[in-house]
């Protein structure tokens, strides 16, 4: 299996510095990062590690759920997956990811709501990004459209 790479170039202090994260393997872009904007409600045109984790988790989860729906005899017509990754101060110092909320809405043929819920929960437990994020509380809100 392949290894994927991202690279960050950072200049300056935490509060006054900034950087650029490059998605090196795919070459799809370079994005600005800044700690003050990372910690603010308005990202102001920059990304953050939490947003990148959210992107990784939502896409991984969608792929895993699609596979599990197929294994259960259903056909995923469409899946809309959102991942909200929360950052907060860590009582031990610094910051930490305090939780991830996955929300999925699906149009699926061949599975009822209970079958979809079962596949959705199994995908949460078995997607590689979920596995990598053990130790973080991950919640799931899953429903058919």
Image (tube, grey):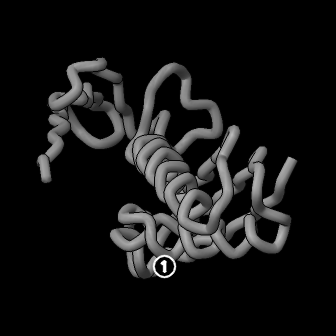
Q: Nearer the viewer, residue 89 or 30?
A: 30
Q: Which residue does the image show at 64% across and 69% down from the upper left? A: 119
Q: Is residue 1 left or right of residue 121?
A: left
Q: Is residue 4 left or right of residue 86?
A: left
Residue 34 image offset from top left, x and y in percent: 37, 33
Q: Is residue 79 left or right of residue 39?
A: right
Q: Secondary structure at mark 1?
A: loop
Q: Which residue does the image show at 34% across and 23% down from the upper left? A: 31
Q: Which residue does the image show at 77% across and 50% down from the upper left? A: 109
Residue 54 image offset from top left, x and y in percent: 50, 48
Q: Residues within 10 Å of mark 1 (few under 14, many from 20)?
A: few
Q: Is residue 91 left or right of residue 104?
A: left
Q: Quadrant of residue 93?
A: bottom left
- From this viewpoint, is residue 11 visible? no
Residue 62, compared with residue 37, is above or below; it is below
Q: Nearer the viewer, residue 94 or 103?
A: 103
Q: Quadrant of residue 144?
A: bottom right
- From this viewpoint, is residue 31 visible? yes
Residue 9 image offset from top left, x and y in percent: 15, 30
Q: Which residue is mark 1?
A: 91
Residue 90 image offset from top left, x and y in percent: 47, 72
């Amino acid at each position: 299996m392949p290894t994927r790479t991202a690279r960050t170039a950072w200049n300056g202090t935490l509060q006054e510095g900034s950087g650029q994260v490059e998605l090196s393997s795919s070459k799809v872009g370079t994005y600005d990062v800044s700690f003050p904007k990372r910690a603010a409600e308005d990202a102001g045109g920059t990304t953050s590690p939490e947003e990148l984790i959210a992107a990784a988790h939502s896409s991984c989860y969608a792929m895993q759920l699609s596979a599990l729906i197929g294994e259960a005899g259903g056909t995923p017509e469409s899946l809309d997956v959102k991942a909200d990754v929360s950052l907060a101060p860590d009582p031990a110092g610094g910051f930490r990811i305090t939780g991830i909320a996955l929300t999925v809405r699906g149009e699926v043929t061949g599975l009822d709501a209970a079958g979809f819920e079962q596949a959705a929960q199994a995908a949460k437990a078995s997607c590689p990004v979920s596995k990598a994020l053990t130790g973080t509380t991950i919640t799931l809100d899953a429903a058919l459209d």
